[in-house]
Image: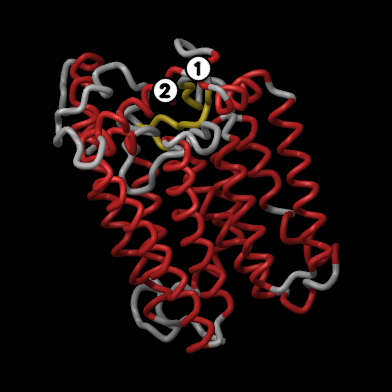
Amino acid sequence: MVYSASFIYAQERTGDGFAFIKKQIIFAILGFGALLISCRINYRKWEHWAYKFALIATGLLALVLIPGVGTRTLGAQRWLRLGFLTFQPGELAKFALIFFVSRQLDRKQELLQKFVPGVLATFLVPFPALLLLLLQPDFGTTVMITVVIFSLMFLAGMPKRFLALIFGVGGGAAALLVLGSAYRRARLMTFFDPWRDPTGKGFQIIQSLLGLHHGSFWGVGLGNGKEKLFYLPEAHNDFIFAVIGEELGFIGLSAVALAFCYFIYRGLKIAYQSYEKYNDKFGMFLATGITLALGLQGFVNMAVVLGLVPTKGLTLPFISYGGSALLVDLFAVGVLLSVARGPQAKGLFSGVKSK
């Protein structure tokens, strides 16, 4: 689908229609290598590395904002350039924060009933990273990470009064950020009525809906879509789900949605078995966080393409074009597979003691 959605665009932009798919293949190979390595690392080791991992990810987010170091594209400064490749630290920070919160909730289970050592201590390290993400700006990733952290706190048994306070503060902050930013207000108004600015802010979602309409039930055929021919912006990236809908129809959309449903089911089953079989809450939090991060992002992307939520700028995991996202997502899947193997599994950096 990346090849189908990007060939004409790549040909026009770079003179090589295979430019994007070649980069995607390189990152896919690197990603599966990262998956095999992280799968063989006993996941309990990440409990010891979580704090350093989160600090490194936060440092990379800070580097992105330094003029001349970070790369700015389409009004957002989210990338670091590594030779002919670019890397998005926000993708790494997403899982680094989940690893840290999983560690905190496991180690401070008895302190969750207290606000300062329970709630504030859990947000102490994630807060600077979330703030740096907002400065890029990357509002969608910030909200997604916050929702996952909130879900893990709920799973850990944090008192409802604390959860209500977090929800209220987070919701209020999100509302202020949306209403206090002109382009976010425009996105919100476009969501309610895309046809109020059909050639401007509403153009992308209108073209997405037209592509889905053309695809109907069976689709127009792989490679035969028209929206990717400079009608639909970011066709190979954020809106690749619309290309799938046009070329593979409702059948293709359903296949992708069901694949994500199955991924979520298997991920949550791994989390459940980690607690039931090994009484390992860290493994449970880690598996749940990884599953929710990828699953939630996937369904939010689908909802954006279908016009069900405002545009967020989130890619479709495993499918959208984006090398750093694919690399980090496959790495996270490897960690999830490590949790499935259990705390006693041998492998790289073995010898970690389990609880």
Seen in the picture, residue 57 relative to 50 is either above or below; the reply is above
Look at mark 1 in the image and give the residue it sits on. 195
Where disc 1 sits, the SS reads helix
Percent across and percent down for residue 280 are: 55, 82
Position of residue 128 relative to residue 215, above or below, is below
**Residue that protrudes farthest toward the top in the picture:** 199
- Classify 243 as above or below 276: above
Amino acid type assigned to the residue bearing label 2 in the image: Ile
Location of residue 21 in the rendering, given as x and y in whole percent from the top left corner = 20, 34
Residue drawn 49% across the image and 44% down it: 300
Residue matched to label 2: 206
* Position of residue 12 measured from the top left corner of the image (x, y, whole percent): 21, 14
Q: Label 1 sits on what residue type?
A: Trp
Please give the name of the residue rendered at 45% of the width and 48% of the height, measured from the top-left corner: 299
Judge the density around disc 2: few (<14), some (14-19), many (≥20) Cα neighbours within 10 Å. many
Q: In this view, does 281 lie above or below 114?
A: below
